[in-house]
Image (spheres, rainbow, N blue to C red):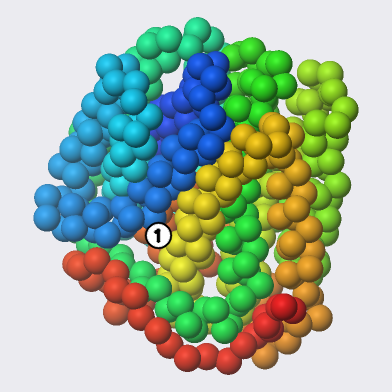
Amino acid sequence: MFSPLVTFPALYTATLLMLAGSGLFTTYMGLRLTQEGVSDLWVGGLMAAYYFGLVCGGKFGHKLIAGFGHIRSYVACAGMATVIVLIHALVSQLEVWVVLRFVMGAVMMNQYMVIESWLNEQAEGHQRGKVFAGYMVAVDAGLVVGQGLLALSPALDYKPLLLVAICFSSCLIPLALTRRVHPAKLVAAPLEIGFFWKRVPQSLGTIFVAGLMVGAFYGLAPVYAARNGLDTAQSSLFVGMCIVAGFCAQWPLGWLSDRVNRSWLIRGNALLLCIAAVPMWGFIELPYTLLLLNGFVTGMLLFTLYPLSVALANDHVEQSRRVALSAMLLTTYGVGACIGPLFAGAMMRHFGPGMFYVLVSAYALILIFWVQPKRVTGVHRVDEAPLHHVAMPDTVSPMAAALDPRVDEVPEELVVEAPATIGRSDGEPDQGEPRS
C-alpha cells in the first residue's frame, strides 16, 4: 500500500524543518518585540510584510526556478533565509526588519513552490490525496515543533535565532541528498478574477476574512498571550495548542462537510467562532488552563474556515478550472493575511490585547451576514458535488493547486515554463451576490 511518508521522506522532512524554523521565528519575534515594549502596530506590520512577500514571491519563484532549476533555487533561497535570520541578531532597526521580513516571505514562497511542484510531478493521480495529506501533516507538525523549540529555549536572546538558522540550514540536507528525479515542468495557474468573483463570491469573501484572522493570529497571538501575563514557554504552548486544534478538527469537520450543506456549515462555524472568542476579549481574567482551552476551541473553528471555503468553491467550478480556482483562492487569502496583522496591530495598540479576539468576533459576524445559503442557486453546481472534502494547510503556494486531489489532472494549457498571467473571463453568478 502506498505510503507518502515512506515514498517522499526527503520532501516531507525538508518541509517539517522549514516550517519549524518559520513557526519558531514568527513567535519569537512577536514575544521579543513585546518584551522590549515595541508597539503592536510594528509587530503587525512585520507580519504583514512577510505575507506581502509571500504574495509577491510567486512571480519571483517562477522566474528563479525556470532560470536555475528546482534544487539550485531551493538551496539559494534556504541560504538567503538563514542569512536573513542571522542579520536579526546583528541589526535591531525595525525599518530594516520590515524589509527583511518581505524578502523572507518571497524566498519562503520559492521553497514552497519547489517542494509542492516536486510532489505534484512525482505523485500519480490515485496517490494525490495521500500525498497532499502527508504534506499537510508535515506543515502543521513543523509549526508545532517550532513552538516546542521556543518553549525549550525560553530566553528571548540570540539563541532562538540560532535554532531558526539551524532549521533553515538543515532543510537543505534532505533535498540535496534525494535520489528522486528532479521536476522538469512548472504549473502556472492564471488568476481569472472576473470569472471567479461572479461564480463564487461567497467563497472568496470567506477566504479573504479567513486570511485577515489567520494572518493576524500568527503574528499577534504570541503578543496577546504575553500581554496577558504568560511567559515565553506558556505563550508558545498557547500558540501551539491553537495550531494543533485546527489540525485535529479538519478531518471530523471534513466528514461533516461531505454530508451537510457547506454554506450552512461555514455560517455555523462563524457563529460558534464569534461566541467562542468572547471570553478572550479581556473583560474577564481567564486562568491559564481556561485560556488554553478557549484557545483550542477558537483554533478549531478558525483554522477550518479556509478548507471549508475551498470545498464550497470547488463544488461550483468545473474540473478544468480548479487549478486556476485554487490559485485565485490562495491569492485572495494572501491579500487578507497582509491586511489582517496590520489592522489588528493598530487596534491592539490603541485598545489593548483583547482587541485581537474582539476583531475575531467581528470578522466572524461579518461572515454570518456574508454567507447566505439561500443565495447559493446551484446553477453551476457540478454533477459530482459535493466533492470530497480535503483537509489542507493554510500555508501553501499556488503550486499546491495541482496537488489538490479534487483536480483529477492538470489541464495541458496550464503546463508552462513561464510565470502565470492574470486573465479575465466572463461567467454567470452561482453562489449569488451577497447583500450589501
Task: Tell me which amino acid carries mark 1.
Answer: Pro
Q: Does 186 sit above or below residue 112?
A: below
| Residue 126 in view | no
Look at 50% across and 63% down and name the residue there: 332
Look at 34% across and 25% down and name the residue there: 93
**Location of residue 416 by image quarter:** bottom left
Look at 33% across and 55% down and name the residue there: 56
**Location of residue 293 by image quarter:** top right
- Tell me residue 210's x, y (percent): 62, 54
- Tell me residue 270's x, y (percent): 77, 56
| Residue 39 in view | yes
Q: Does 49 sit above or below residue 256?
A: above
From the image, which quarter does the C terminus lie in?
A: bottom right
In the rendered view, does 150 fall on the left or right side of 410? right
In the rendered view, does 315 fall on the left or right side of 192? right
In the rendered view, does 403 fall on the left or right side of 79? right
Q: To which residue does mark 1 refer?
A: 398
